[in-house]
Every structure is written in C-alpha cells, then in structure tokens.
Amino acid sequence: MLNPHDVRKDFPILKRKVNDCPLIYFDNAATTQKPIQVIDAIKDFYENHNANVHRAVHTLSQEASELYEDAHDEVAKFLNAKGTEETVFVRGTTEAINLVAYAWGLHNLKKDDEVVLSMMEHHSNIVPWELVSRTGGFKIKYARVNRDGTLDYASFEKLISKKTKMVCLCHVSNVTGVINDVKRAAVLAHEHGALVLVDGAQSVPHMPVDVKDLDVDFLAFSGHKMLGPMGIGVLYGQRDVLGAMEPFEGGGEMIKDVSFGRRSGRCSIAWNVLPWKFEAGTPSAGDAVGLMEAVRYLKRLGMENVKRHEEKLTTYALSRMQECSEKVEIYGPTDSSSKCGIIPFGVKGLSSHDIALFLDSFGIMVRSGFHCAQPLHELLKLNSSARVSFYVYNTPEEVDKFVEVLEEIGQF
Amino acid sequence: MATVDEYVSRIDGTCGKEKDVIVTFKYEKRDEAVKTILGRASLKKSLAGIIFELEFKNHSFRLYSSGKIIFRGVESKSELNAILSALLL
C-alpha cells in the first residue's frame, strides 16, 4: 500500500509555505509536482551527458542518445506497447492529438467521412479536429453526456456508422474524473472499421494502462501530469498505423535520406524508421530523461497502489465535502469507484475564482474556471467550477484542512 | 507621478460568460494597495479578514488580503484602469 507521508519526503516543493500556510497542492489534474529523483535526473543529464542526440559519434552524443532511447523503452514497457517504435515523444497531449489530426486526418479523412468525439472532451481533443475539418471537409459528431457527467453510451453508439473513420475519447474526464469505458468504445469503433484515439492525460498518471488490453490505435498523454517535466509527452500509436502515416513535421532526425536527383533536380526524401519519423528536429532529451525517471518512480510505487490511494482519498474527500454546509455543491458522480481523484465543486453565491482565491489564502491550490472544457460546463449548466484533484503525495489530513476552509467560505 | 503599473503585477481575464477580471498586486505593494482600497471603497461584507466585498463608484468587486481583486462586468482595459486609478492613486 502506498504511504503518502513517505512519498511526500521526495517532493521538495511540499516543504514550502504559501501565504504563511503549509502548501496543500490539490491541482494535480493541471500539473503534478516533481520528486527529487526526477529533478536530479534532469540535472545529471545537463551536468554530465548533454549533447544533441542521434547526431554525432562523440562520447557525449552517444550517452545522450542512449538515455533518450532508454526513455522510449521505459515508456513502451510502462504501457505494455510492442516496442519503442510505438512511442513517439512530443511536447504533450495537445501536440500528440494535433499530430494525429494533421498527419493522419488530413490524408485520410474525406468529405463524407465522420469523426466521433464526446462533449466531455478537453479543448485539446476538440479544436485540432475542428481545425482540420475546415480543410478536409469531414463531419464531426459529438456524443452526449448525461446530467451526472457520465458518457451517454447509447448516444455514442448511435453515432458510430460505416462513415465513422476515427473515434476520439478521453479515458478520464479532466472536469469530473469520470472514467470512460474506452475498451468498449474501441471494440465498437473497430467493428465499423474506424480507428480510436484516447486522450490519456488524466488516466495514464493515475491507473494501470495497458494498450494491448485496451486495443486502442492511439493514446496521448503528458509527462508533467505524471511527475515528469513540462515539455515532454507521448503519442502511443500502433506500429502498423504509425507506419502507414505521413510524417507530421519535417526536418532533421525524421529523415533517412534527402537527395537531389542529378538530372531531374528533384528532391527525394526517405523517412526515418519509427518512432523517429515523427520526431523532427532536436528533441527535448533532458525532459525525456526526466520522464523516464518519473515512470520508474511510478513503477516503484505500483500503479495499482496509486489508483487505490486516490480512490480511498477521493471517497474520504467526497464524504467530508458532503458534510459541509448546503452552500457547497459537488458536481458529477459521487461514487469514487467510477472516477479518478478529481472532484469539481462550487459554493453558492461565489464564483469559482473566489473559491480558489479564498483557499489560496490558506495555502491550498485548486483550479477554477472551465479547465479547458467549456462545452461540458455549458452542458452541465455551470458558469464555471472549482476543482480539487489528488495525487500520490496528498493525505487525508490535507483533505481535513481543505474541508475546514471550505466550511468557512460557506459562511460568506 | 504614481501610476497603476507601480501596484499591479498581472491582469488576467477569465474565459466564458462570466468574464471575471483578476488583478494581482505586486508582492511588495500588496499590503499598501489593500489598505488604500479598504479605506476608499465601502464595505458590504467580509470574512475572516481575507475576503472583502466592496463597492466603489457603482462597481462591486471582491478584494483579497493576499493582494488580488476580482472584478466582474468591466468592459474594457481603459475602464479597468480608471477604476484602479481611482482606488489606488
């Protein structure tokens, strides 16, 4: 079992105070804090191994390249992917989804084709498809969401047809924490010949995710939401699907040969092998090393333990919040077994920003606003929401302090 | 001559229909700014010396002792600047 009090010792930032109060960090769905192991790994890379990767034969470049490749390998094993060729490093979930929307969507989606999304998606899984559809002319259909924030599977299933070429769904909603049955979605999509892209930004950091078991074609997630640095993320893609795709960006690293024919004067280009075909330019190697260390840290904790810890803490927080004054409203489902450690809430008469600023005065960091998911807020008839989201270092004692302050806000 | 910029560190607009504007004062100036504003605006209600609901020249807003203000319904940068000037300078 995971002991958050032990885990906390690895996180230097948790020792600081904010507004003269001990820091309580409940904004983990936005980004997580970093353990000393990750900070040290990045520091070690720049102090001892820094060089451009896959570019030179000198010792430093060889060391940096090995570390960079090891990072791909570590991530591939973490996801139970077939190998490193299925793990493309990108800046984050947003870039991963844009990569698929442009590199696959632009070349494969025609006028009468359809892409199916849900109304609970983060803007990063809506806007790229809407942008590409302006060029490609294909249709986008949105599956409905129930009043409690869960996916309306009947609506979703009705939208899937022979016209559907891509199904995009978040594994876990970043607003409500609801876990979607992406395995079920993948079976249905594949029956109709469509591909499946899963936004795993809020699932990969919090639960065991096995891409073979889920049988999805793409999985996108960010390093910074799973103890790693900002600026590095992953696009998992099935080998055959990635192999058949055109590259996203052009430049160094993603090519094997670029030459001009002597007679024709034409440029001929051969792409590099996977995953480098999709990693144009100098990669963020130091961040990749940080991500590798973050993955190792999570593996040591055990993803089942991470999931159980968050479930327990969420159950506790939900029960304590329900004891609060009637002014405190919890949005979305209150059954913690069907969701991750994310709880959206409001206080009658106060905006979400008021709530966040009041909590901030006590050193408690929560998110406020739309959380980049405006359509879902409109659907749930919310102007905005405050959101607490937990991770491996959060404790029941922190929840108690949060509830104490929440009770006080209710008196305003 | 003093300007609003001497006090203000950041101005953030929120997305959506509410269109809240959040003004953050510079750390070294926040206590002075909070004290000045509390002296000029009329207090409607407050809680724990942390949050103050205030009114000033037909504008209702919330001031935080941590050095932030939330305005709602402010239409433009110039309107915001005029309110802040009147509150601070």
Image: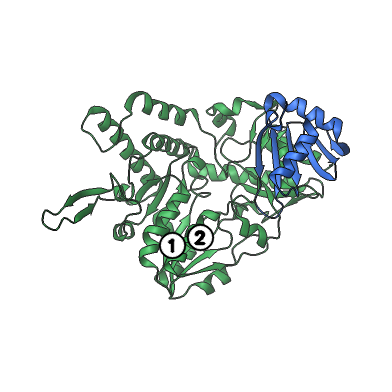
Residue placed at 51% from the left, 60% from the top? Answer: A169
The residue to which callout 2 is attached is A169
Q: Which mark is residue A109?
A: none
Residue placed at 33% from the left, 57% from the top? Answer: A242
Figure chain in green: A
Q: Quadrant of residue A78?
A: top left
**Colour for chain B in the figure:** blue
Mark 1 chain: A
Q: Quadrant of residue A361?
A: top right
Marks 2 and 1 close (CB-CB < 8 Å) = yes
Residue type of the residue flagged with mark 2:
Leu
The residue to which callout 1 is attached is A196
Of callouts 2 and 1, which one flags the residue occurring earlier in the amino acid sequence?
2
Mark 2 neighbour density, 10 Å: few (under 14) some (14–19) many (20 or more): many
Mark 2 chain: A
Residues at marks 2 and 1, CA–CA distance in whole angstroms = 8 Å
